[in-house]
Image (spheres, helix red, strand yellow):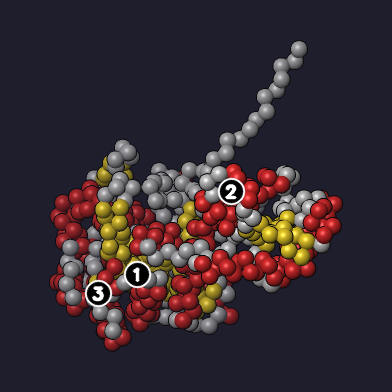
Amino acid sequence: MAKKKKTFRPKARVPKGLRDIPAATVRAEGAMLARIREVYELYGFEPLETSAFEYADALGKFLPDEDRPNEGVFSFQDDDDQWLSLRYDLTAPLARFVAENYDGLPKPFRRYQTGPVWRNEKPGPGRFRQFTQFDADTVGAPGPAADAEMCMMAADCLEALGIPRSSYVMRVNNRKVLDGVFETCGIVGEGPEFEKQHLTVMRAIDKLDRLGSEGVRLLLGPGRKDESGDFTEGAGLSDNQIERIIAFTEAGGGTRDAVCSAMEALVGDSEIGREGVLELREIDALLTAVGYEEDRVAFDPAVVRGLGYYTGPVYEAELTFEATDEEGEQRRFGSVGGGGRYDDLVERFKGVKVPATGFSIGVSRLFAALEALGKVEENTVAAPVIVLVMDKDAMPGYQKMVAELRSVGIRAELYLGGSGMRAQVKYADRRGAPVVVIEGEDERSKGEVTLKDLILGAQKSEEITDNAEWRESAHAQVSVPRTALVEHVQEILGRHSKAH
């Protein structure tokens, strides 16, 4: 007897570092995005959609992650043997779009975009390989006024979502100032090895709030082993260089003017460093003129941003209230977005300087923050009225019922499964339906339909104590003329909306 061949059945599982998002969260995040979009539109930005895939050489290599294939991005070859990569942010595709359509775009070009991005990095608690960003960028604006505007708009977004001024701060720095500190430390050079070291230093400082100064010292020096045993290679700086960089990151905490003065002392005679401080002073003057004081926008030398393409001012939106982390400990919530100036990205395509600056919100992290603050808008989408199918030969009539309900704005669904009445009512109950519509042969012969009020039924079932009382009660069920279906469903829904 032939051995029965075993049928392969794939395991149902979400890929590592990815997640599924349920309906209630999708709707609540959608409401949050709508509020952010209103602020972006108020500032004059226009929507844009770019493709999820880009040619790998167009994205560039700004996410070096040595222990990951393709240096931190997900890539594959197409039929023409060209390498494609999933976008790791929304900024690099924007640079390609601007370069490709440069002559037809107004300059400055102001756009916003929201969508998923992908990074082939080690996942962890709250850290996913796919996540959503919501960006706004100004391309073609060379002065610090565009950077100041980004900080103001980001602050306005947080307040529009209900985050009070005491619970957030925009932290601002300038990459040019850090480059000036590098000069005074003797960290200079060119070529791939220097660029790698330079970015390693940036990414180390970017982890200051998470790892503390000792963890950053290790990443600036020989390297660091994390709790899982994974080792991250360090920048290989000397002890003296490390201490000067740590001293720079600790130069904040005062007024914007005081921080600028401290930075001037640290950059010494470095031309690029002094240029960076001057830009920060211009941003300070613009913010002050509009009334954005230090409680909303502060200067902080510890802000550097981890991406390699920033060339000037950089900023982060930090939430300052405490929330419970995965280990049950109270911690400051931290960064929910950031951005900065990137004057070299479009130049990669055009060969000429095209100044640009932008801000990106981490949607999932900001949503988690709003949940912690109790600021998430409740799901206001009503569950659908369910029309049951008692007789499949009467399907056209059932379809007409849901069409009538939908025509007056009532969310309605025709049951399309293959189960009997009891299972259909159970399905409607699990869907949270307020009402089910029943038309069997008896109802049809009388020109009626039966409406079962599931909300009232649930309330009555809690009050009824014995079977006799159950049988004697109408139990939230009423027969009405078929021609009055819409009117009576509206009446039931209106009664429950008033109760809330």
Sequence-wise, the earlier of marks 3 and 2 is: 3
Query: Residue 490 or 337: which is nearer the viewer?
Result: 490
Closest to the observer, 42 or 259: 42
Instruction: Kindly identify the amino acid type of the residue bearing the numbered disc 2.
Output: Glu
**How far across and how far down the image is residue 204, in percent?**
28, 54
Return the mark for residue 295.
3
- Residue at (57%, 75%) from the top-left corner? 101
Tell which circle, 1 or 2, labels the residue nearer the N-terminal end. Answer: 1
Say which element carries label 1. Answer: loop
To which residue does mark 1 refer?
163
Residue 305 in view, yes or no: no
Tell me which residue sits at (37%, 63%) in the image: 374
The residue type indicated by label 1 comes to Ile
Residue 316: x and y, percent? 33, 67
| Dot placed on the residue nearer the N-terminal end, 1 or 3 | 1
- Local secondary structure at mark 2: helix
Q: Secondary structure at mark 3?
A: loop
**Badge 2, how many Cα within 10 Å: few under 14, some, many 20+?**
few
Report the Cα–Cα distance between label 1 and label 2: 51 Å
> Would you call the spot at circle 1 few (<14 residues within 10 Å), some (14-19), or many (20 or more)?
some
Three-letter amino acid code at the position of disc 3? Asp
CA gap between label 3 and label 2 equals 63 Å
Q: Residues within 10 Å of mark 3 (few under 14, many from 20)?
A: few
Which numbered tag is attached to residue 318? Answer: none
Name which quarter of the figure residue 311 lies in. bottom left
- Of 172 and 5, nearer the camera is 5
In this rendering, is residue 480 above or below 350?
A: above
Tell me the quadrant of the picture where the N terminus can be found: top right
Q: Which mark is residue 469?
A: 2
